[in-house]
Each structure stands twice: as structure tokens, then as C-alpha cells.
Image (spheres, rainbow, N blue to C red):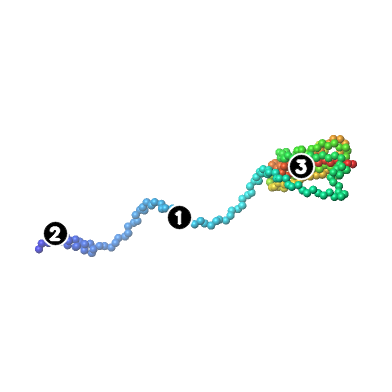
Amino acid sequence: MKISFKVLWAITTLVCAFAIASCTGSSGDDGKDGAGGPQGPQGEKGIQGIQGPIGPQGLRGTSGDQGPIGLQGLKGSTGDQGIPGVPCAGCVDTASIVAGAVTNYWTKIGATDATTSFTTPGVWEPLPDMSLDVNSSGGFFLIQFAAPFQVSTDGSNPNAAQVRLLIDGVQASTAGGQGNAQLEAETSHRSIGVISFIHPEILSPGSHTISVEWRAAVGSNRWVNQVAQIHGKRVLTIIELKR
């Protein structure tokens, strides 16, 4: 009996397949891991997270240096005139006092701003516009002075504005009157106030010069101002009374 080649090939293939299935052994151990592959590309940026809570407030910083003095403001308008007073029976007005008690009268007003030089602490300087020449008949005099002052400090030491009265270049005695005065400023700030005095004096007949000097008590970045156009003018008044 003849068997065709195709049938023979099919039988052979079937026998081989059966033999392989019947003779297969157990599985071997897993092989070692292969080397890691290259890093992949970076992924896209994620969405922004929720904002965290506000942190506690920090400590307060130190105070800064004081700024410079600002510019002078505009002058205000003049107020309305007051209602005239009603004279009373038996009243004595200023004119009658002057006529009956005052022999002579002098006054000087300082309207310009003035500043002491802190490069020469403790040195007396003439206060601008505060000098008068008077002619005495040998009578009793009242010498009055008043002015607002501004005193600064360097932040660690006090300072003071000081004024004194001179008669013919000599400081007036304080016995029986106030021949000098001062305005003090404590540390770390400035002071604004009025210095004033009334000094009685008997002047010999003839011509005399009455003047006021001022100074800053200490120096080194500390000064004294007499800002006449803002705080007020300085005034020196001399009255000779009848004896």
C-alpha cells in the first residue's frame, strides 16, 4: 500500500508534537533582572497647591530717624475785629497811666527767624534785633523781654536755650530781678516754649545800651531756634518810670 508524502508528513509532525509534550521538563529558575532602561522624559507641571495659612506677625522694627522740618504753611486770614469795649465811669486807661507814670518808653521787635550755631556750644551770641539805646534821666527802669524758642537734642543728651540781659555790655545782676532765663529740652525730643523776664534797674543819667544775648547750653548737633514767623516774634521793651 502506498502512502502519500503529505500523509507521511502529517503523521511525522503529529508524532513529534506528542513526543515534545510528553518529554517536557520542569521550569527553570527566573533569570537575573536586566539593566534599567534610560530615564523617561519629565512629565507636565502639576496644578498649584492650596495656599497655606498666614504666618504670625513679625517683631516691630526700630523707629527711623526724625525727618527734616517741613516747609512753613500759608499765613491764615485775619480774623474779624472784636466788639469795642464800653468805657466805665472811674476807669483808668493805659493812656492815663502812661501820662502819669511813664517818662520814656522804648520797644524793639525781632520779626526775622534766628538760629544759634551749635559749633560753638556755650558761647553767648547777640540775639538779632534785641538791642536798644536809651537816654536815662536817672530814673527807675523796667526792662522786659519775651520770645518763644525751639530747643533740639541729639537723642541722648539734654539741651537748653539760655538768654541773658546786658546793660552797657555787662550782664545784669539777678538780685531783685531776673537778668537771665532758660528753656530746657529733655533727651530724644524737642521743646517749644516762651522765655521771658522783667528786670528792674536804676540807670545813671546819660546814654545806655540794653541788649539780650542767647546761646545753646550744649553743642554737637543740638541747636536753638527763634522762629519768629511761625512761633511768634521776640520783643524787648524798656520803660522809664517817673520818680
Which residue is tagged 2?
Answer: 5
Q: Quadrant of residue 70?
A: top right
Q: Residues within 10 Å of mark 3 (few under 14, many from 20)?
A: many
Q: Is residue 6 above or below residue 67?
A: below
45 left or right of 164?
Answer: left
Tell me residue 215's x, y (percent).
Answer: 75, 41
Between 208 and 165, the one lying in front of the other is: 208
Farthest top residue? 207
Q: What amino acid type should be assigned to the residue bearing mark 1?
A: Ile
Q: Nearer the viewer, mark 2 or mark 3?
A: 3
Q: Is residue 236 above or below residue 52?
A: above
* Residue shown at 17% from the left, 62% from the top: 11
Q: Is residue 85 above or below residue 107?
A: below
Do the residues bearing badges 1 and 3 touch, measured as CB atoms within 8 Å? no
Farthest bottom residue? 22
Which residue is tagged 1?
Answer: 47
Tell me residue 102's x, y (percent).
Answer: 86, 42
* Disc 1 element: loop
> Which quarter of the figure is the C terminus placed in?
top right
Q: Quadrant of residue 231?
A: top right
127 left or right of 99?
Answer: left
95 left or right of 59?
Answer: right
Between 145 and 36, the one lying in front of the other is: 145
Q: Is residue 233 above or below residue 4?
A: above
Image disc number at residue 234 = 3
Task: First in sequence, mark 1 or 2: give its number.
Answer: 2
Q: Quadrant of residue 15?
A: bottom left
| Mark 1 to mark 3 CA distance (whole Å) | 74 Å
Between 165 and 109, the one lying in front of the other is: 109
